[in-house]
Amino acid sequence: WHDLAAGRLVPVLEAFNTGELEPIHAVYLGRPDHVPARTRAVLDFLQAHVDLRRAEQPLP
């Protein structure tokens, strides 16, 4: 977190583009009634990314 806050992290693979939506599977092996905040943040980010990408795709 400190590296992120300090701006020491840099983007990688910026030119990489998967094109069509790729399946994403997130598996959490902990207790379902207690998801740590960091894990919840990653899952929420992935869901928002998938929702945005899905909204950008043309309807068949």
Image (spheres, rainbow, N blue to C red):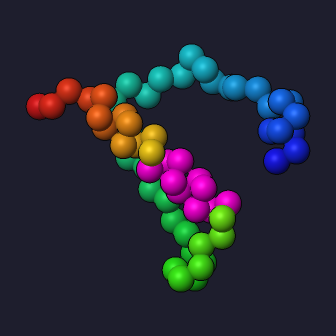
Check if residue 56 falls in the magenta segment: no
* Residue 49 picture quarter: top left
**Which residues, given as a range, are shown in magenta?**
38-47
Q: At which x and y percent is residue 60?
A: 11, 31
Q: Where is residue 43 drawn, in percent x and y?
A: 53, 56
What's the residue at 83%, 30% (across, down)?
A: 7
Tell me if 55 is positioned left or right of 13 in this view: left
> Going 38% across and 25% down the picture, which residue do you hit?
19
Task: Specify whether 4 is left or right of 15.
Answer: right
**Above-or-below relation of 18 to 15:** below
Q: How many numbered discs sit on the rendered protein?
A: 0
Q: Which residue occupies the foreground of this view, 5 or 42?
A: 5
Residue farthest to the top?
15
On screen, 44 above or below 22?
Answer: below
Q: Is residue 42 part of the magenta span, yes or no?
A: yes
Q: Residue at x 49, y 59 (%)?
A: 26
* Residue at screen point 29% across, 34% down: 55
The foreground one among 10 and 13 is 10
